[in-house]
Amino acid sequence: MVRDRVESFLKSELRKKKALLFVLVDSEVSDPGTSGKLARDVERIGASAILVGGSSATDQIEMARVVKDIKKETKIPVILFPGNVTGVVPNADAILFSSLMNSENPYFISQAQALGAPSVLKFGLEPLPTAYLVIGEGTSAWFVGSARGIPFEKPKIAAAYALAAQFLGMRFVYLEAGSGAKTSVTPEMVKTVRRTFDGFLIVGGGIREAKTAKSLVRAGADALVIGTLLEKGGSIKKLRDIARAIRDK
Ligand code: 1GP
């Protein structure tokens, strides 16, 4: 029933590429009818997965429609990226089954997960056990998730959370600067987390330049998430540059 197809796929991709590109589609920002085309474009560029969700996406009907549109157009996995129980919808391949470990509200650490888990099972979504760590302050993820943001200049704190996540059996860590963040997580933080955490390390928030992407991968990121860059008819060309910069071993 619960399989590990997506996790195995990501691992096999990682054997071929230096790092993977995940594209985030916020179902409430994407224009209706365009998500399928966007998915096709990003698959061609070499994205390994499409994430659907985000902390401000709450309309389940819209989200389910976007997932269906994307599934029709692509072969790469569609992975839900829920900000709440409303982020659990059918027809996706997997879900970042995340605990916002540095939230001040237990709801985002374990209660939403308990409320959402039965639907994850019912919809046959593959749960990818993820420690979601919010870095810095002032973003939607930080506000909505009641996070006590880990300061950008405190990489050891992030590493301690990542190690705790590993001890708890989580196989994914997501270092999140927040969608549209002014600056991304620092390579220094990625490097410090990489030294202690040996699972799959995802980094996202505020990545807009190939140069930044490259430095994060060099520091040890396994996958980068790009969202805002592509919103509102954003730049596919820039995404292609990023994909090239992080792909080659
Ligand atoms: C947000 O990490 C993702 O959850 C992507 O961030 O929108 O800044 O690319 P951007």
Image: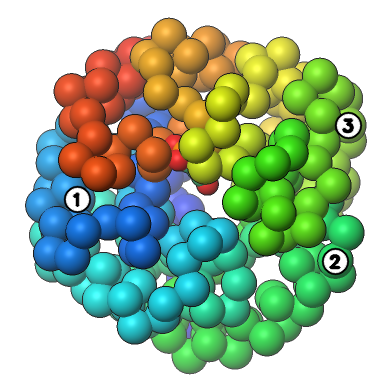
Q: Position of residue 19 (x, y in %)?
A: 43, 26
**Which residue is label 1 attached to?**
39
Q: Are marks 3 and 1 in contact (CB under 8 Å)?
A: no
- Where is residue 43? Give x, y as percent: 19, 42
Label 3 residue SS: helix
Asked if residue 203 shows in the view, the reply is no
Q: Is residue 216 visible?
A: yes
In the visual, does 215 lie left or right of 230? Answer: right
Q: Nearer the viewer, mark 3 or mark 2?
A: 2
Say left or right for 184 vs 100: left
Q: Residue at x 47, y 53 (%)?
A: 7
Q: Which residue is mark 3?
A: 157
Amino acid type at mark 2:
Asn
Q: Mark 2 or mark 1, which has the lower sequence index?
A: 1
Q: Of the numbered discs in the image, which one, if any, rests on residue 215?
A: none
Give the number of the mark in front: 2 or 1: 2
Identify whether 61 is placed above or below 80. below
Q: Dot 1: few (<14), some (14–19), or many (≥20) neighbours within 10 Å?
A: many
Mark positioned earlier in the residue sequence (3 or 1): 1
x%, y% of residue 23? 35, 43
Q: CA distance from mark 2 to mark 1?
A: 34 Å
**Number of residue marks:** 3
Q: Which residue is mark 2?
A: 105
Q: Earlier in the sequence, mark 3 or mark 2?
A: 2
Which residue occupies the foreground of this view, 236 or 51? 236
Where residue 135 sits: x, y (%)?
72, 36
Relative to 63, residue 152 above or below = above
Helix, strand or loop at disc 2? loop
